[in-house]
Amino acid sequence: MFKNLTSRNAYVLYHIVICLAAFILLVGLFVMLHMGQKTKEDLKNSLLVRAQNAALFVDPDAIRLMQGNESDTLLPEYIELKRKLTALREINPDVRFIYIMGYNGTNLFFYVDSEDPTSEDYSPPGQEYPEASAEELIGYFSNDSYVIGPVSDRWGTWVSAMAPIIDSTTGTRVGVVGVDLSADDYEGQLIFVRGAIIAIAILIASLILVFGLYIRKSMQHMYALSQKNEKLETTKGELEKIQKLVQLGKWRWTPKSAFVSFDDTMHELTGVPKDKKVTYPYFQSILLPEDRTVLDDALAKANAEGVDDFTVVYHVTRQTDNALVTIKSACTIERSGSDGVTAVTGTAQELECSV
């Protein structure tokens, strides 16, 4: 193949190979920038969704009862919020802090955070946050969810998502839920994606330079690298699925009305249409027969033991595809002095799904 090449042909082919390698590097750079931006947006969107989901667990009335000082630590509402934030922090190991903030007329301040009180990073009720930037304050008063960062404060450098806690009756904001991701972890994921892409681009260009005159082998190596790139994309997709799995659904059962309300995630887990009014008997009907009294039994046991919290695991036949979904729910009983149990609220975390 190469015996009939003249020096001019070799010269032209050499420069074609160099131009092709340079083109590959430019494409790699473009893809790196594009995927880096997309990954950045995906990370921020994921963080924002988690902040918004956390805000759904916060009762605005509980915030209204707080004074924003150390006396709050004695309130049952503070203790319950502390428990919920700590639990959310544990199931989101990539997140460093989850907290609720308010505004005292001068600065943002902390109502409650996910830290153990013995931790040096613990923020007691009423601790002010003067580091808040103008962007944070504008976001706070806008009643919109937003993401900022990386920004630095006394605890480190963070990418932070903020979601308002809105009183559904009045439509007013009573505080915000904040979720902090370490800037090192955030940048590390971006560097990984960008580095992988540019490394692939450099490797392809090097192979073209080395085997530019050996086209067949060059194409084989390009195909192998393409397969590796697809594997990286698949791995990224699996990571995104895992992040979604840790997001919790929520339901609320009012025994006297015999209705169960689902949030969007719970509708997705069970396959029940969002426009369907879910009665308790209907909810029982989509459970496996042996699980249909699991809530009643757990509630009776909790009442007998005088506790307000319990955990149950049950199996739901998803209505859209008849898949068997195993769900774990952490439940809280709401009581009234005269009426007894008024409601049971629970989270919903998918443990297993089989078709």
Image (spheres, rainbow, N blue to C red):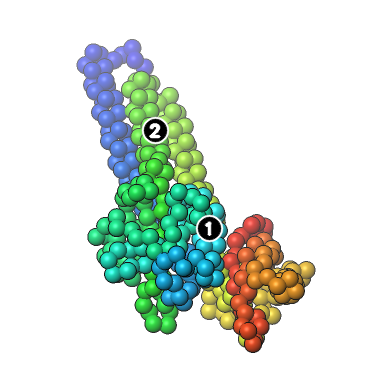
Q: Gap in Å between the C-alphas at discs 2 and 1? A: 41 Å
Image point 37% across, 55% down: which residue?
Answer: 160
Quadrant location of residue 148? bottom left
Label 2: few (<14), some (14–19) or many (≥20) C-alpha neighbours in 10 Å: many
- Picture quarter with the C terminus: bottom right
Q: Is residue 315 above or below residue 27?
A: below
Q: Which residue is mark 1?
A: 86
On the image, the x and y values in percent for residue 76 come to 55, 71
Image point 55% across, 58% down: which residue?
Answer: 87
Question: Would you say 275 lies left or right of 34 here?
Answer: right
Image point 34% across, 15% down: which residue?
Answer: 2
Q: Which residue is mark 2?
A: 200
Q: Nearer the viewer, residue 102 or 23?
A: 102
- Picture quarter with the N terminus: top left
On the image, the x and y values in percent for residue 336 come to 61, 83
Image point 33% across, 12% down: which residue?
Answer: 3
Q: Is residue 342 above or below residue 215?
A: below
Q: Nearer the viewer, residue 33 or 192?
A: 192
Residue type, numbered disc 2: Ile
Question: Which tag is nearer the camera, tag 2 or tag 1?
Answer: 1
Residue 327: tell me if it is visible. Answer: no
Residue 98: tell me if it is visible. Answer: yes
Question: Would you say 189 lies left or right of 315 here?
Answer: left
On the image, the x and y values in percent for residue 231 come to 49, 40
Q: Sequence-wise, which precedes: disc 2 or disc 1?
A: 1
Residue type, numbered disc 1: Thr
